[in-house]
Amino acid sequence: FKIRKKISKKNCKINFNKVFYLVKKSNLKNSIGGYFPVNYEIDDLEILKEFKKKNYQISLPVIKKNFDMDFYKWSFNDPLKINKYGIPEPNSIKLVYPDVILVPLVAFDSNLNRLGYGGGYYDRVIKKLSIKKKILKIGLAFSVQKINNVPVTKYDKKLDYIVTDKYIL
C-alpha cells in the first residue's frame, strides 16, 4: 500500500497501447470490464476512456452477497454509488459479461498468479465468466509489486497477462 502510494504520486501510468495490443491480438472485441481504482491501485480509468472512444462497451464490478461479483454497464456520465468497502460501483441494472477484464492486484509473480485483498471476488467472477465464454484476463500493476512467489490455492485463477508501468508479462 505504501509503495503504491509513493509510486502513484510520481504519476506512473500504464500505456493504453500496451493493453490495446493485447486485446486486439485476442480477437475479443466487444466489451471491457474495468474497475474503479482505490488504495492507490493502477488507475485504469484513462485506459477505459480510450476503449470507450474505440466503441467498446465499458462495465465495472458490483459486489454482491456471498463474495459474489458481477459486471454492470457503465459510462463516464453515469452516477456511481459507494459499496460497503468504499468502492464506487455503477447504478446500472444492465448485467454485462465482459470479453476482457482488467484486474487490480496487490502483488503478482512471474507465473501470472495474483494476490488480491483476500476475498476471492475476482477468482469467482473469472471462474463464472470462463464457463460462459472465452475471456481475456489482464492484471494491471506497478512493476515493484512483483514478488518471487504468490501463495496459490486450488481456487486461485491465473491471469493471461500482467501489464506494468515497465513491461508486459
Image (tube, rainbow, N blue to C red):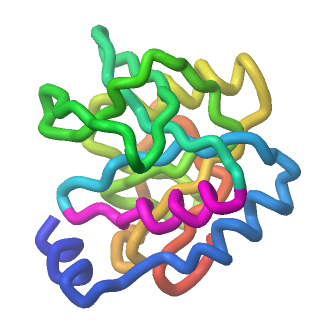
**Residue at horizontal 75 percent and vertical 41 percent from the top:** 30
Q: Position of residue 57 (x, y in %)?
A: 63, 42
**Residue at horizontal 71 percent and vertical 18 percent from the top:** 131
In this orientation, which residue lies closer to the viewer: 77 or 42?
A: 77
- Specify the segment rendered in magenta: 40-54
* 35 to 52, vertically: above or below: above
- Asked whether, in this view, residue 106 is left or right of residue 22, the answer is left
* 77 to 11, vertically: above or below: above
* 119 to 32, vertically: above or below: above
**Residue at horizontal 16 percent and vertical 74 percent from the top:** 5
- Asked whether, in this view, residue 82 is left or right of residue 164, the answer is left
Q: Main secondary structure of the magenta part?
A: helix
Q: Position of residue 80 (x, y in %)?
A: 27, 36
- Image quarter where the N terminus lies is bottom left
Magenta run includes residue 50? yes
Q: Is residue 124 visible?
A: yes
Determine which quarter of the picture holds residue 119.
top left
Q: Is residue 155 visible?
A: no
Q: Position of residue 13 (x, y in %)?
A: 42, 79
In this orientation, which residue lies closer to the viewer: 123 or 43?
A: 43
Determine which quarter of the picture holds residue 9.
bottom left
